[in-house]
Image (spheres, rainbow, N blue to C red):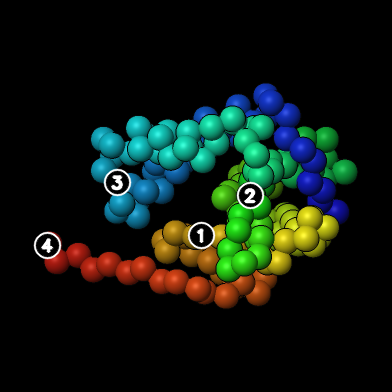
Amino acid sequence: MLTLTPMTEPEFQTYYDMAVADYAQEHVRGGQWSAEEAPEASAREFKGLLPDGLHTANNYFFSLRVPEIDVPVGMLWFADRPAGGNHVAFIYDIYIEPAYQRRGYASQAIQALEAEARQMGLSEIRLHVFGHNLAARALYDKLGFEVTNVMMRKSVMP
Protein backbone atom coordinates (compact mmCIF):
# COMPACT_ATOMS: atom_id res chain seq x y z
CA MET A 1 0.00 0.00 0.00
CA LEU A 2 1.26 3.45 -0.93
CA THR A 3 2.39 5.81 1.84
CA LEU A 4 2.91 9.57 2.04
CA THR A 5 6.48 10.34 3.15
CA PRO A 6 7.53 13.94 3.83
CA MET A 7 9.60 15.19 0.93
CA THR A 8 13.30 15.93 1.47
CA GLU A 9 14.93 19.16 0.31
CA PRO A 10 16.74 17.44 -2.63
CA GLU A 11 13.46 15.75 -3.68
CA PHE A 12 11.71 19.11 -3.45
CA GLN A 13 14.31 20.85 -5.65
CA THR A 14 14.00 18.15 -8.31
CA TYR A 15 10.22 18.35 -8.14
CA TYR A 16 10.16 22.17 -8.17
CA ASP A 17 12.24 22.48 -11.33
CA MET A 18 10.11 19.90 -13.14
CA ALA A 19 6.83 21.37 -11.90
CA VAL A 20 7.61 24.93 -13.00
CA ALA A 21 8.39 23.69 -16.52
CA ASP A 22 5.35 21.40 -16.68
CA TYR A 23 3.00 24.09 -15.37
CA ALA A 24 4.24 26.48 -18.04
CA GLN A 25 3.53 23.92 -20.76
CA GLU A 26 0.04 23.16 -19.39
CA HIS A 27 -0.82 26.86 -19.58
CA VAL A 28 0.48 27.07 -23.14
CA ARG A 29 -1.57 24.01 -24.10
CA GLY A 30 -4.62 25.44 -22.32
CA GLY A 31 -4.25 28.73 -24.20
CA GLN A 32 -3.65 30.93 -21.15
CA TRP A 33 -0.02 31.84 -21.90
CA SER A 34 2.15 32.10 -24.98
CA ALA A 35 5.20 29.85 -25.27
CA GLU A 36 7.43 32.91 -24.88
CA GLU A 37 5.86 34.18 -21.66
CA ALA A 38 5.12 30.80 -20.05
CA PRO A 39 8.47 30.02 -18.34
CA GLU A 40 8.64 33.39 -16.58
CA ALA A 41 4.93 33.42 -15.71
CA SER A 42 5.13 29.92 -14.26
CA ALA A 43 8.23 30.75 -12.20
CA ARG A 44 6.52 33.90 -10.91
CA GLU A 45 3.40 31.95 -9.84
CA PHE A 46 5.46 29.29 -8.06
CA LYS A 47 7.51 31.95 -6.23
CA GLY A 48 4.25 33.58 -5.13
CA LEU A 49 2.76 30.30 -3.92
CA LEU A 50 5.93 29.02 -2.28
CA PRO A 51 7.99 31.98 -1.03
CA ASP A 52 9.76 29.70 1.47
CA GLY A 53 9.98 26.69 -0.83
CA LEU A 54 9.51 23.36 0.91
CA HIS A 55 9.03 25.19 4.21
CA THR A 56 6.19 27.49 3.09
CA ALA A 57 3.52 27.57 5.80
CA ASN A 58 0.40 25.44 5.27
CA ASN A 59 1.88 23.62 2.26
CA TYR A 60 2.66 19.91 2.44
CA PHE A 61 4.92 17.95 0.10
CA PHE A 62 5.06 14.18 0.08
CA SER A 63 6.93 11.55 -1.84
CA LEU A 64 4.67 8.64 -2.73
CA ARG A 65 6.29 5.39 -1.69
CA VAL A 66 5.35 1.75 -1.99
CA PRO A 67 7.07 -0.53 0.56
CA GLU A 68 7.91 -3.15 -2.08
CA ILE A 69 9.70 -0.53 -4.20
CA ASP A 70 12.60 1.37 -2.67
CA VAL A 71 12.13 4.53 -4.78
CA PRO A 72 9.42 7.21 -4.86
CA VAL A 73 6.74 6.42 -7.46
CA GLY A 74 5.52 10.01 -7.45
CA MET A 75 4.71 13.04 -5.34
CA LEU A 76 1.84 15.02 -3.87
CA TRP A 77 1.59 18.71 -2.95
CA PHE A 78 -1.39 20.10 -1.12
CA ALA A 79 -2.14 23.15 1.00
CA ASP A 80 -4.42 23.83 3.93
CA ARG A 81 -6.62 26.63 2.57
CA PRO A 82 -9.62 28.46 3.99
CA ALA A 83 -12.84 27.99 2.02
CA GLY A 84 -16.40 28.85 2.99
CA GLY A 85 -15.66 29.10 6.70
CA ASN A 86 -13.82 25.78 6.75
CA HIS A 87 -10.33 24.63 5.88
CA VAL A 88 -9.79 22.32 2.91
CA ALA A 89 -6.92 20.34 1.44
CA PHE A 90 -6.26 21.92 -1.95
CA ILE A 91 -4.22 19.65 -4.20
CA TYR A 92 -1.78 21.71 -6.20
CA ASP A 93 -0.08 18.75 -7.82
CA ILE A 94 -0.11 15.00 -7.89
CA TYR A 95 2.46 13.30 -10.08
CA ILE A 96 3.17 9.65 -10.80
CA GLU A 97 6.43 8.75 -12.53
CA PRO A 98 5.70 7.45 -16.06
CA ALA A 99 7.17 4.01 -15.27
CA TYR A 100 4.61 3.60 -12.44
CA GLN A 101 1.49 5.04 -14.09
CA ARG A 102 -1.68 2.99 -14.62
CA ARG A 103 -1.04 0.90 -11.49
CA GLY A 104 -3.52 2.61 -9.17
CA TYR A 105 -0.96 4.75 -7.34
CA ALA A 106 -2.78 8.04 -7.99
CA SER A 107 -5.97 6.58 -6.52
CA GLN A 108 -4.03 5.30 -3.52
CA ALA A 109 -2.42 8.72 -3.07
CA ILE A 110 -5.84 10.40 -2.97
CA GLN A 111 -7.06 7.83 -0.45
CA ALA A 112 -3.98 8.44 1.71
CA LEU A 113 -4.62 12.18 1.43
CA GLU A 114 -8.22 11.67 2.57
CA ALA A 115 -6.93 10.08 5.78
CA GLU A 116 -4.33 12.86 6.22
CA ALA A 117 -6.97 15.57 5.66
CA ARG A 118 -9.32 14.00 8.22
CA GLN A 119 -6.48 13.81 10.74
CA MET A 120 -5.70 17.52 10.12
CA GLY A 121 -9.38 18.46 10.58
CA LEU A 122 -9.82 19.55 6.96
CA SER A 123 -13.37 19.33 5.66
CA GLU A 124 -12.79 18.32 2.04
CA ILE A 125 -10.31 17.98 -0.79
CA ARG A 126 -10.37 20.38 -3.72
CA LEU A 127 -8.28 20.66 -6.86
CA HIS A 128 -8.02 22.23 -10.29
CA VAL A 129 -7.63 20.14 -13.42
CA PHE A 130 -6.99 21.44 -16.92
CA GLY A 131 -9.87 20.61 -19.25
CA HIS A 132 -7.58 18.88 -21.75
CA ASN A 133 -6.32 16.45 -19.08
CA LEU A 134 -8.95 13.79 -19.73
CA ALA A 135 -7.13 11.03 -17.85
CA ALA A 136 -6.98 13.08 -14.65
CA ARG A 137 -10.61 14.16 -15.02
CA ALA A 138 -11.70 10.54 -15.38
CA LEU A 139 -9.69 9.57 -12.30
CA TYR A 140 -11.21 12.34 -10.19
CA ASP A 141 -14.72 11.45 -11.39
CA LYS A 142 -14.09 7.83 -10.40
CA LEU A 143 -12.88 8.92 -6.96
CA GLY A 144 -16.06 10.93 -6.31
CA PHE A 145 -14.94 14.49 -6.98
CA GLU A 146 -17.71 16.85 -8.13
CA VAL A 147 -17.33 19.54 -10.78
CA THR A 148 -17.69 22.96 -9.15
CA ASN A 149 -16.73 25.29 -12.04
CA VAL A 150 -16.33 25.01 -15.78
CA MET A 151 -14.46 27.47 -17.99
CA MET A 152 -14.79 26.99 -21.72
CA ARG A 153 -13.46 28.55 -24.91
CA LYS A 154 -14.10 28.42 -28.65
CA SER A 155 -11.67 29.69 -31.24
CA VAL A 156 -13.07 32.02 -33.88
CA MET A 157 -9.88 32.05 -35.92
CA PRO A 158 -9.34 29.58 -38.76
Residue located beneath label 2 in the image: 79
For mark 2, give the secondary structure. Answer: strand
Q: Which of marks 1 and 4 is in front?
A: 1
Q: Where is residue 59 in the image (x, y as percent from the top left)?
A: 65, 43
Q: Nearer the viewer, mark 4 or mark 3?
A: 3
State the mark number for residue 93: none
Give the amino acid at mark 2: Ala
| Spatial separation of the CA atoms under disc 4 and disc 3 | 19 Å
Give the amino acid at mark 1: His
Number of other residues with Cα within 10 Å of mark 3, as a class: few under 14, some 14 to 19, many 20 or more: some
Check if mark 3's residue and mark 2's residue have beta carbons within 8 Å.
Answer: no
Residue located beneath label 1 in the image: 128
Out of 119 and 39, give the one closest to the viewer.
119
Out of 104 and 49, give the one closest to the viewer.
49
Count of residue discs? 4
Residue located beneath label 3 in the image: 33
For mark 1, give the secondary structure. Answer: loop
Out of 17 and 53, give the one closest to the viewer.
53
| Spatial separation of the CA atoms under disc 3 and disc 2 | 25 Å
For mark 4, give the secondary structure. Answer: loop
Check if mark 2's residue and mark 4's residue have beta carbons within 8 Å.
Answer: no
Q: Where 44 falls versus 143 (above or below)?
A: above
| Spatial separation of the CA atoms under disc 1 and disc 2 | 13 Å
Which of the two labelled residues, at mark 3 and mark 2, occupies the earlier sequence position? 3
| Spatial separation of the CA atoms under disc 3 and disc 1 | 17 Å
Check if mark 1's residue and mark 2's residue have beta carbons within 8 Å.
Answer: no
